Amino acid sequence: MLSRATEGTAQNVELGLSGDRKEDAITPTFLGRRVPAKPWKEVQSLAFPPDNDVKEQVRAASDIVDVLGGYLNLRRQGRGYVALCPWHDDSRPSFQVNPQRQSWRCWVCGIGGDVFSFVMRRESIEFREALELLAERANINLPSQGPVAPAGSPDDKKYQFNALAWAERLFHELLLNDPIADEARRYLHDRGMTKEAIHRFHIGFSPNDWQWLCNKSNQSEYTQTVLEKVGLIGQSQGGRMYDRFKGRVIFPIRDVQSRPIAFGGRILPAYADEKSAKYVNSPETRLFSKSDNVYALDMARDHITNSKKVIVVEGYTDVIALHEAGVKNAVAVLGTALGPRHIQLLRRYADTVYLVLDGDDAGQKRTSEVLELFIAQQVDLRVCTLPEKLDPCDFVQQQGADAFRAHLAKSLDALEHKIRIATAGIDLANDLHGANDALEDVLNTLAKAPNLAAETSSEVRLREHQFLARIARQFQVAESELRTRLSSLRKATSSKQRPVSYDEAPVVTQKVYRIAELDNWDRTLLELMLALPETIEWCLDEIGPDELISEGAKAIYQVIKSRSDAHEDCGFPGILDSIDNESLRFLLIELDESAASRGFGDPDEELKRIVAAYRTRHEDRFEGQQVASMQQKQVTPEEELDLLKQIVEQKRNRQGISFPTDG
């Protein structure tokens, strides 16, 4: 809200130009202020000395061209760089990097940001993780967020990562070179595993010896205590340490940064007995949770991101066989059923999930069990049922990748698959009891999802309408009856279930902001502040946030004001840091680029022009409000006369007409 009253006009009207400055106070001495002009980087450094802010230390040490060049094939174009965008099917480089501003943007996606936001989006991690990753890259020690384990101690996270990498190398080199691994090499060969696949997936072998890794530990820098912490060895009831993966082919499980965090072990048939589990996975550790990770995501991520599709299978060998056949967007669950956190993870990269489980009866039962999760998560799930009770590894090795893709293309969506499972063996036309039971089963599954029809998004509401319409057609029941029954089931379900968690909440679509949609004066004001940071303080003093018309411009202006009020950096990087909305960040980058190419003249004259425009707009709005009050008879005749005088005075002031004096 403008907060200045113009002398000689409406005495107590808020005009939005805070302070008591008159128009003629705008002077060539830079608006009456002795503020030396400084480049934006110098202005930035005043509020954020690198020595006092580790984030700025990390930023300064993480040149955006160097960091992004590790992910993308950057090509110089003019003063900046371009690349193919990793987040859409980009054939002409639409991804741009500005080394001067240390920013990036994609015109097609309408997103942008700084080095931190790129790493967060690319790695699908939160800010703290991105900061840690970049700090490690720059060899900068971050301040702790609580008690920190001493470097090299069993609880030191870096030490744990190094111990897992050490074990991975031991297992892998043993498989490649040692005669003791002959049985493992024969097994992998018989399973169709190539040498290239063994190298690419870092497959290894753990000998059939309870003490092999324990003994190796005694000859290394990694203690048995840390190996126990990361799940490589265990302790018997008698206190004796033993190798957890004895006699097994080893499949390293890596995080999205390709760091080993756990292992899966497949017992060799020659070493198996009645007590041996076919597969053993690492236990839950500080670095590994089976509910938050999937196998081979680090290798499949780019292919998933590009296609927006992910294939989920059950086993390590299924993933490896698919990747070797050229189907590289496949991952596997880790010895557990697919759960909500898996879905949340996959949803970061893909729009569609293809669930390809074994064709045997057990596989089909598991498929039915997870459908409720996918419906509740509102994910586009497709279920692929393999023929002849084959698993994906056998199928692709016997029939090839093209046959697998063709079968994948015939996948059913989740609802259709659920209906087929529920109605299997039932004559819907003649078996009334069976048909009713099947219908109840389908509606019960649907009732466990959030109430799609209650959502504000027309697209989401349409989805539920389509679900019910399909069910009505297949069961020959009126849609109105289905809706009534579904409502009853939802009420019963909601009284028994816990509240829907954040992870299960519908995805809210962010508003898209574009520079072309901004009010002309709002755009000019922000571009001036970005081009000449030394004008920011005066602009904030004279123009209140409520005087801006465009929603996006007002949001950015408020960010600048908040940072200024807190005595924080108001240069471009600082403003960018304070904006979470990707579309709003993109708008800021657009404004910054536009400001750099626009070029401003004398700051005094530019500010005179901008402030005068906002003042005029405010006076016009004030006049409109007063005229409306008079037309609606909301004021007394005396008040109406005063308002008319004020309006006339405003017009005379604007036109430079002096007021008549008494006498």
Image (cartoon, rainbow, N blue to C red):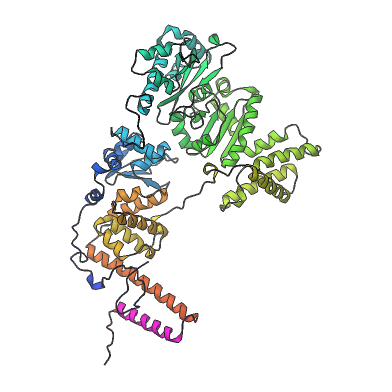
For the residue pair 51 and 648, the one nearer the viewer reads as: 51
For the residue pair 654 and 630, the one nearer the viewer reads as: 630
Left or right, 110 with respect to 351, comes to left
Where residue 597 sits, quadrant-wise, is: bottom left
- Residue at the spot 40% in from the left edge and 74% down from the top edge: 622
Query: Does the rendering let one see residue 406?
Result: no
Helix, strand or loop: magenta stretch: helix
For the residue pair 87 and 24, the one nearer the viewer reads as: 24
Q: Which residues are magenta?
A: 633-654
Quick one: quadrant of the N terminus? bottom left
Left or right, 160 with respect to 472, comes to left
Residue 652 is covered by the magenta coloring: yes
Where residue 172 sits, quadrant-wise, is: top left
Q: Is residue 260 above or below residue 497?
A: above
Residue 52 is covered by the magenta coloring: no
Number of numbered markers: 0
- Residue at the spot 18% in from the left edge and 62% down from the top edge: 34
Quick one: quadrant of the C terminus? bottom left
Q: Is residue 626 above or below residue 56?
A: below
Query: Does the rendering let one see residue 150?
Result: yes
- Please provide percent x and percent y for residue 438: 73, 38
Left or right, 478 with respect to 154, comes to right
**Residue at the extreme right:** 430
- Residue at the spot 28% in from the left edge and 90% down from the top edge: 662
- Please provide percent x and percent y for residue 454: 60, 52
- Please provide percent x and percent y for residue 356: 58, 29
- Please provide percent x and percent y for residue 336: 55, 27
